[in-house]
Image (cartoon, rainbow, N blue to C red):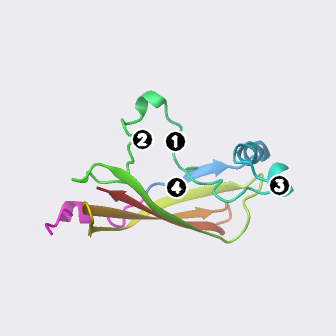
């Protein structure tokens, strides 16, 4: 199997984004709870954010015209890869406490690994990310690991 991951690509491992500040409002929690058909009253009242509420919260709001042909915006924390088709590879979240209205959260993302595997239809490049969400006082609220697959 040819090595598609160059030293230049490997040098991206460990790179991170500047932390993004996100202020959590009760209204945003309620809107998300309604849109995702939550059933628990604590979510519908906006007392606590449901799981997955923070997914993508660190991403900027983007005009449709600025999205790529695949519907995704260019990720500044992704090197140019020789394989262009992008797929989601998985996500794990670990919460340390609930996300509640009034929280001002700091979200940072880091590339933790880039590696290649041979799939049944050809080579795959995996990019693994670590995401950390902290409260204003530095308390860890949530950790997430994400994998992105290029083929």
Q: Nearer the viewer, mark 4 or mark 2?
A: 2
Task: Between residue 29 and residue 84, name the one nearer to us.
Answer: 84
Dot placed on the residue nearer the N-terminal end, 4 or 2? 4
Identify the residue under disc 3: 47
State the SS at label 1. loop
Magenta segment range?
Answer: 1-16
State the separation of the CA atoms marked 3 and 1.
Answer: 25 Å
48 or 117: nearer the viewer: 117
Q: Nearer the viewer, residue 24 or 3?
A: 3
Q: How many marks?
A: 4
| Disc number lying in front (3 or 1) | 3
Viewed as shown, does residue 11 lie left or right of 87? left
Which of pointers 1 and 2 lies earlier in the amino acid sequence? 1
**CA separation, marks 1 and 2?**
9 Å
* Mark whose residue sits in front, 4 or 1: 1
Left or right: residue 102 compared with residue 53: right
Residue 127 x, y percent position in the rendering: 36, 62
The crowd level at tag 2 (other Cα within 10 Å; few <14, some 14-19, many 20+) is some
Q: Is residue 72 above or below residue 16?
A: above
Q: Which residue is mark 2?
A: 73
Determine contact: label 1, label 2, CB under 8 Å: yes
Which residue is more in the foreground, 139 or 147? 147
The residues bearing labels 3 and 2 have C-alpha atoms spaced at a distance of 32 Å
- Asked if the magenta segment contains residue 21, the reply would be no
Quadrant for the N terminus, please.
bottom left
Q: Give the residue at mark 4.
A: 19
Residue 112's disc is none
Label 1 sits on residue: 60
Which residue is farthest front? Answer: 120
Q: CA distance from mark 3 to mark 4?
A: 25 Å
């Amino acid at each position: 199997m040819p090595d598609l991951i160059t030293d230049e690509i490997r040098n991206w491992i460990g790179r991170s984004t500047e932390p993004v500040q996100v202020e959590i409002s009760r209204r945003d929690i309620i809107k998300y709870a309604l849109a995702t058909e939550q059933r628990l009253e604590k979510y519908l009242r906006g007392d606590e954010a449901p799981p997955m509420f923070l997914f993508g919260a660190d991403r900027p709001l983007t005009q449709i015209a600025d999205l790529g042909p695949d519907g995704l915006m260019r990720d500044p924390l992704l090197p140019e890869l020789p394989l262009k088709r992008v797929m989601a590879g998985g996500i794990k979240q670990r919460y340390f406490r609930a996300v509640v209205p009034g929280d001002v959260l700091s979200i940072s993302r880091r590339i933790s690994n880039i590696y290649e595997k041979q799939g049944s239809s050809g080579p795959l490049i995996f990019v693994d990310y670590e995401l950390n969400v902290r409260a204003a006082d530095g308390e860890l609220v949530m950790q997430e690991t994400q994998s992105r697959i290029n083929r």
